[in-house]
Image: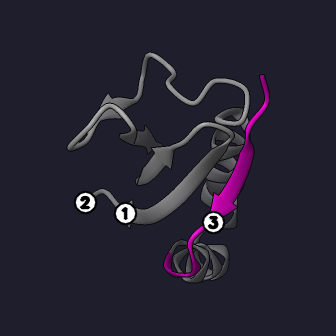
Amino acid sequence: MSRQVVWDTAALDTAAGILKSDPDGLLQLMNAVDRLAQNPRPPESLEFASADVRRLFIGLYRVLYEVADDTVTVIAIHRVT
């Protein structure tokens, strides 16, 4: 089952900033998020507050997202320091 990936406005704004400073990192991040449509709970993701809210580390970034019946919503992106 493929889910729709939806981006919260704040996550999109952060991605736009990453595009300017780290385009290769953004490409890696976008590819990983796209894969969440097929497998929203990959083994490398961790629960965050509930089974439906998860975080995924991708290179220098952490993606916080929520899994619903037919959507994956990207809530936030943070740079790991």
Q: Which residues are magenta?
A: 1-10
Q: Element under label 3?
A: strand
Which of the labelled discs sits on residue 79, or is there none? Answer: 1
Q: In the rendered image, which quarter is residue 33 located in?
A: top right
Judge from the rendering whether residue 5 lies leftward or rightward of residue 50; answer left or right. Answer: right
Question: What residue sits right under mark 2 in the picture?
Answer: 81
Q: Element under label 2?
A: loop
Q: Is residue 2 magenta?
A: yes
Q: Quadrant of the C terminus?
A: bottom left
Q: Residue at 63% x, 24% y: name it.
A: 39
**For the residue carrying disc 3, how many other residues have a C-alpha within 10 Å: few (<14), some (14-19), or many (20+)?**
some
Q: Is residue 8 magenta?
A: yes
Q: Residue at 77% x, 22% y: name it.
A: 1
Judge from the rendering whether residue 51 lies leftward or rightward of residue 22; answer left or right. Answer: left
Marks 1 & 2, CB-CB < 8 Å contact? yes
Query: Mark 1 to mark 2: distance in Å?
Result: 6 Å
Image location of residue 32, percent across then percent down: 64, 39
Q: Residue at 56% x, 72% y: name it.
A: 8
Image location of residue 56, percent across then percent down: 42, 39
Q: Nearer the viewer, residue 56 or 6?
A: 6
Image location of residue 58, percent across then percent down: 49, 42
Mark 3 or mark 2: which comes first in sequence?
A: 3
Q: Specify the farthest residue to the front.
A: 69
Query: Mark 3 to mark 1: distance in Å?
Result: 17 Å
Mark 3 or mark 1: which comes first in sequence?
A: 3
Judge from the rendering whether residue 74 lies leftward or rightward of residue 43; answer left or right. Answer: right
* Snapshot colouring: one colour
Q: Nearer the viewer, residue 46 or 25?
A: 46
Query: Mark 3 to mark 2: distance in Å?
Result: 23 Å
Q: In the rendered image, which quarter is residue 54 located in?
A: top left
Q: Nearer the viewer, residue 66 or 69?
A: 69
